[in-house]
Image (tube, rainbow, N blue to C red):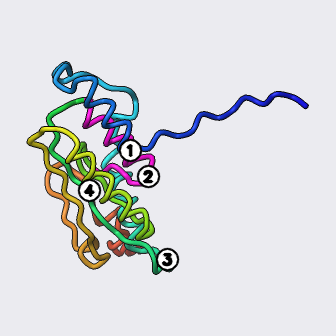
Amino acid sequence: MLNMPRKKPEIPFVEIMKKLNSAGLKKTAPNRVLSGEEEIMSLENRVEYLLDIIHRDKRPASNMLFFVMYDIESNKVRYQIMKYLIKKGCTRVQKSIFLADLPSSIYNTIREELALVQESYDNNDSILIFPISTDYLSAMKIIGQSIDIDVITRSKNTLFF
């Protein structure tokens, strides 16, 4: 029988954050450039993702649509939370804002684990997690960067003569 390499057991997110805290959070370099996961998809792709959720014919009844937003001082903690949210299936819509359309069980896990992380070290950070309906999401307005939302939403009618 061959000796198969054993897969290391996955360390729970809260434990990773406790270890990070014990290693010292204050030693973070300011404005450090992080890996490629720091990249955010283009505005058009983000809007397309939002519209896909709105126009889906069959969203699972057990899914929750919710935003996660944070204001976190430590680059290390902020980076770990960003990686965690992406791993859980959240989509980054801005640097510190994520949108998810996930089962209620994952929503509850995210909420509970982020609360434990928040309590695990002395900080002035804030994390907001709140459900949103597809009606509110469909009423979104984009202010700022130039984008033709009518083209993306396919709401313009074109007449050919």
Label 2: how many residues lie within 10 Å, few (<14), some (14-19) or many (20+)?
A: some
Point out the image quarter for the N terminus. top right
Earlier sequence position, callout 3 versus callout 2: 3
Instruction: Return the residue at label 1.
Output: 84
Circle 3 is placed at which residue position? Answer: 60
Give the image quarter of residue 102: bottom left
Q: Quadrant of residue 130?
A: bottom left
Between residues 76 and 4, which one lies in front from this camera angle?
A: 4
Position of 73 compared to 102: left or right?
A: left
Question: Which stretch did the figure color magenta?
Answer: 76-93
Kindly report the distance in space between the C-alpha atoms of the residues bearing marks 2 and 4: 12 Å
Other-residue count near label 1 (Cα within 10 Å), few / some / many at <14 / 14–19 / ≥20:
some
Q: Examine the residues drawn in magenta and state their main secondary structure.
A: helix
Kindly identify the amino acid type of the residue bearing the numbered disc 1: Tyr
Q: Which residue is mark 2?
A: 88
Residue 154 numbered tag: none
Image depth: mark 1 or mark 3 in front: 1
Q: Earlier in the sequence, mark 2 or mark 4?
A: 4
Q: Which secondary structure, mark 1?
A: helix
Q: Where is residue 137 shown, x and y percent of the image? A: 27, 71
Magenta residue check for 158: no
In primary-sequence order, the first of circles 4 and 1 is 4
Q: Secondary structure at mark 2?
A: helix
Mark 4 element type: strand
Label 3, label 4: how far apart the Cα atoms are: 20 Å
Distance of label 4 from label 1 (alpha carbons): 12 Å
State whether residue 84 is above or below residue 148. above
Mark 4 lies on residue: 68
**Given the image, on which type of amino acid does mark 3 rest?**
Pro
